[in-house]
Image (cartoon, helix red, strand yellow):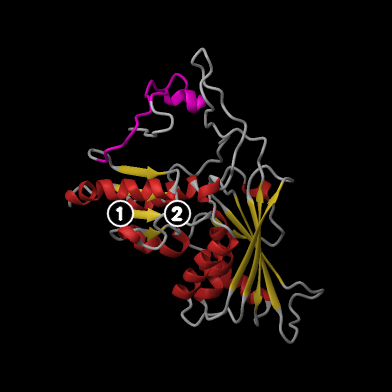
Amino acid sequence: MTVASEEVAGLRVDMLHRGLTGDTDMCVVPSLDPSGHDAVFLCGEPWEARRWMEMYADVLDADEEHRVRVIDLTGAFRDGAFGMVYGLPEHNRKALVRGATRASLPSPAAMAVALALIPLAKNMLIQGPVTASAAIASAENVSSGIPDSPDAKGDVAVSTRLDPIAPIENRPDGDDAAREVTRLLRQIQPSFAWSVSLSISRDQKFPRGIIATVDTPASLPLAELCRRYDEAYDDHNFTYLLDRMPTPADVANTNKCLLHLAYPSNDPDVLSASPSLRVVSVIDNLLKGSAGNAVHCLNLLFGLSERTGLALKASAY
């Protein structure tokens, strides 16, 4: 195992991740040669991921019998460059299992919105424009584990700042995430010809997570729509439909997505002339929206059980 970072090269890993004290004496190295590794997770900035892939493309492709699996958390390759599969298991599980060796993860906001819409798109039921909003935890009081500059004694001061999405340079805005969702919907439902609008905001009322509220025209009774959602996610391990409104506390420290459907009217089964279905989607942006999904994709790339390493609730991040 190797941990590489130009920024904190030379530091012990257990200085960055205090829970590993006593378990490892490994130090961070400045660069990573993938030779001899089974898998590589790319984190940080998109330009760094692209530079690394360009630098080691020949090494990664050299051994047909032992292909290094690459999981990109930066979003640099969501367009499929370098043979990356879009890392949304609820849509691309077959592709990830059947021969893929690389995956680029969705942005957290796009994932929350996409999971709210995939069952509709699979059934060709999206009948108009999609309007969505995503409230993302501010999490200003949670430690990131990223060190500030060492002090005079050489100790590392751990910052109390955390950006739960990504660094500023790598944070997709609403328009970027909307385009990401639009591409996906057109793949699943070729007849989708409408717009997706997505606004992203910060919410300090919860420490972590994303609450996405998605509205789109629909024409089936709520009970039938719920049946279609249950059917779409029946053989998936982490996405569930609830008959109550989910909250970030329901998914915190898990790799789960919880969904709730409603027609915003007094009687949800009585359809108006142009009814609008509301889907609320809740995920933990640090797990289902990032690290947990990375492990999920890794399991699929290696043909392991989807729940490997993800069955228990994390105690901290």
Q: Which residue is mark 2?
A: 75
Relative to 123, residue 175 above or below: above
Q: Residue furthest bottom?
A: 273
Q: Main secondary structure of the magenta part?
A: loop
Return the disc, 2 or 1, that comes first in the chain's sequence: 2
Q: Nearer the viewer, mark 2 or mark 1?
A: 2
Q: Which residues are magenta?
A: 10-34
Q: Nearer the viewer, residue 221 or 37?
A: 37
What residue do we see at 49% from left, 83% from top?
Answer: 191
Is residue 20 shown in magenta? yes
* Left or right: residue 162 compared with residue 89: right
Q: Amino acid at mark 2?
A: Gly
Is residue 298 in view from this perspective?
no
Instruction: Tell me the residue that label 1 is attached to.
Output: 101
User: Real-space Cα distance between discs 2 and 1?
Assistant: 16 Å
Residue 72, x across and y down, in percent: 40, 50
Q: Where's residue 187, x and y in %? A: 44, 73
Q: Is residue 10 above or below residue 125?
A: above
